[in-house]
Image (cartoon, rainbow, N blue to C red):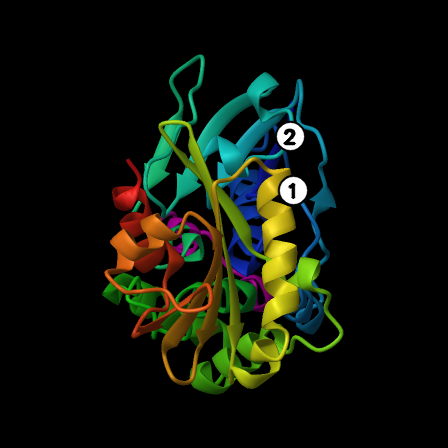
Amino acid sequence: MAKVYVIGHKSPDTDSIVSAIAYANFKGKIDVDDEYIPARAGEINSETKYVLERFNVPVPELLTNAEGKNLILVDHNEMGQVVDGADKARIFEIIDHHKIGDIQTSAPILFHAEPVGSTGTIVADFYFYHKIPLSKEMASILLAAILSDTVIFKSPTTTEKDKQIAEKLNEIAGLDIEKFGMEVKSAKSDIKGKTANELIMSDFKEFEKDGYKYGVCQVEVVRYDEAEARKDEILKELEAVGASKGERLAVFMLTNIIDESTKLWFVGDEEVIRKAFKKEPVNNEVFLPGVMSRKLQVVPPIHEAIG
């Protein structure tokens, strides 16, 4: 019996952690010959902690180096986001909802990617398609993953499939979807007691284009004022984080889930920000009304503006 670790990206969010848990459980039900172990590539954030504790679901095993191990990757497919040692591991599958990245494998694999708002949507659909029963706890955390990544269906990444799968999950979970979504998001939006580094690294993703490295983190809040009072502190730490990773641009998305807008703070290449968003930055900031998605509304224009 082989051990296979199902793992999401570094700086894991709720979708990444829940997808690892739920997909490992799913694989274990359809393949009894191998052992599927949910794992994480970093510490969980406050939102994920709230979700797992609420439904009594164990935190996945921390995997700091995957060298020599068998892996299934969920919710990512870029080398800048994989667990350390993944380049010397055996990757068997990738399940994701992001753009196709730069991971290469030595043999053919199952690669399932869909343009939906959450990897949790894809994993839940596997259960329904194969008629694998879902426990109330598993349905609830998958629902939380979808609500988190789609920002309670407000994100432009949201699809009809996300909404349909969420409704099917809630037939099992029996929750008030809107209320539950706000409870999940509120668990992450409280920034009190968190250091600038904790805020940045709680959801920091690294990207690269033609040797140009950049990073984008996103912090969701219900109002701007608490974070704005710490802007200088956050920018200083953002600069340190970017420098430590050799990045020419580091971006901090401060997203207000009530106003549905983002204050984009950055350090580094101002010209790329100017070209990407067609706005003149003021004090390392551009205001982006209607922008809530890193995947759809921030990374693509930055990527396009490089080079």
In the image, which disc is placed on residue 84?
2
Residue at 64% from the left image edge and 39% from the top image edge: 244
Residue pointed to by mark 1: 41
Which quarter of the rendered picture does the N terminus lie within?
top right
Q: Position of residue 7 (x, y in %)?
A: 58, 40
Alpha-carbon span between mark 1 and mark 2: 8 Å
- Location of residue 241 with respect to 162 vertically, above or below: above
CB atoms at circles 1 and 2 under 8 Å apart? yes
- Location of residue 81 with respect to 251 vertically, above or below: above
Residue at 34% from the left image edge and 54% from the top image edge: 273
Q: Position of residue 50 (x, y in %)?
A: 67, 71
Q: Position of residue 71 (x, y in %)?
A: 57, 29
Q: Does 151 sit left or right of 33 as displayed? A: left
Q: Position of residue 138 (x, y in %)?
A: 56, 61
| Residue 125 inside the magenta-drawn segment | yes
In the image, which disc is placed on residue 117?
none
Which quarter of the rendered picture does the C terminus lie within?
top left
Q: Which residues are magenta?
A: 123-138
Callout 1, which amino acid?
Answer: Ala
Instruction: Please tell me which residue lies in front, 28 or 148.
Output: 148
**Disc 2: CA contacts within 10 A as few (<14), some (14-19) or many (>=20):** some
